[in-house]
Amino acid sequence: MTSEYFLKQAEAGVLLISFNSSHKKNAFTNAAWRSLAVELDAAKQDDDVTVVVLTGVGDDFSAGHDLADSPEKDAEGNLAYQYTERALAAFDKPLLMCPKGYAIGGAATMLLHADMVYAGESLKLKLPFAALGLSPEFGSSYLLPKVAGPQLAAEMLFCGEFVTADEALASNIVTRVYSDTELLEKTLEIARSIAAKRLDALRMAKRCLIAARRDALSAAYRVEAKAIEDALFGR
């Protein structure tokens, strides 16, 4: 299965969604952010899908937002990435991500919403928001300190240096590191083992896992959205 922005492969309860703009390191346009939200919402509603895996075609996960496609508000006043934010927060099934190569900006903070992240050894993760004059997004101002600790989170956000796969593993952003060549198949093996279990039980476990963070994440979304809007469009 294909769409304009993604390759999709469904098998035995596992839906693999691959970002498919490898000629520009799988960067997301405004339309691609909205499209990913549609794909996640559809997978949430589809009882034939038990587990979703996100990855990138080619050598990279994603370079984040395509800087050639300026962020813009739609008729409802939303920025495109916010649709994906909400879809990730509401996704109540197991969600795995397997990045390698570049994972920058929103593609890096997206990883914080995964239940498990299996990284390739080539992973180069970066949060360049301060250098771009922007605030963090995808709830990372809340999730990153929870995952990596407040001091490391501050260093990553303030300094914006690249983080390697091993460093991401040590900071709990990544669950396990594999070679790039075995990464996808290892991730799919785990996804298939999860998908063999009962969907209702997995959903119940996922809802319990995300329940405690729901209010804090919603608050982070609001604060981040206001900061990004101020930065992009002025106060």
Image: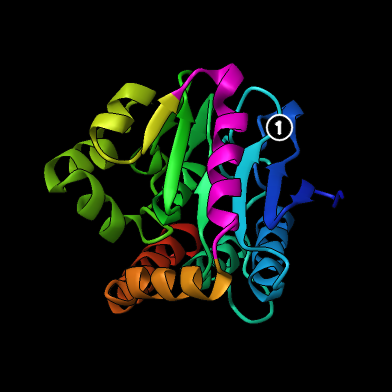
Q: Give x and y (percent) for residue 70.
A: 64, 51
The secondary structure making up most of the magenta span is helix
Q: Nearer the viewer, residue 144 or 230?
A: 144
At a point 32% along the width and 33% down the height, the residue shown is: 160
Answer yes or no: is residue 67 visible.
Answer: no
Q: Quadrant of residue 170?
A: top left
Establish if 135 lies above or below 97: below
Q: Quadrant of residue 181?
A: top right
At a point 48% along the width and 68% down the height, the residue shown is: 202
User: Disc 1 marks which amino acid?
Assistant: Val
At a point 24% along the width and 36% down the height, the residue shown is: 171
Q: Residues within 10 Å of mark 1 (few under 14, many from 20)?
A: many
Establish if 226 lies above or below 138: below
Give the magenta-colored segment's residue range. Answer: 178-197
Q: Nearer the viewer, residue 186 or 25?
A: 186
Q: Give x and y (percent) for residue 140.
A: 34, 55
At a point 52% along the width and 64% down the height, the residue shown is: 88
Q: Give x and y (percent) for residue 74.
A: 67, 73
Q: Which residue is mark 1?
A: 57
Dot 1: element: loop
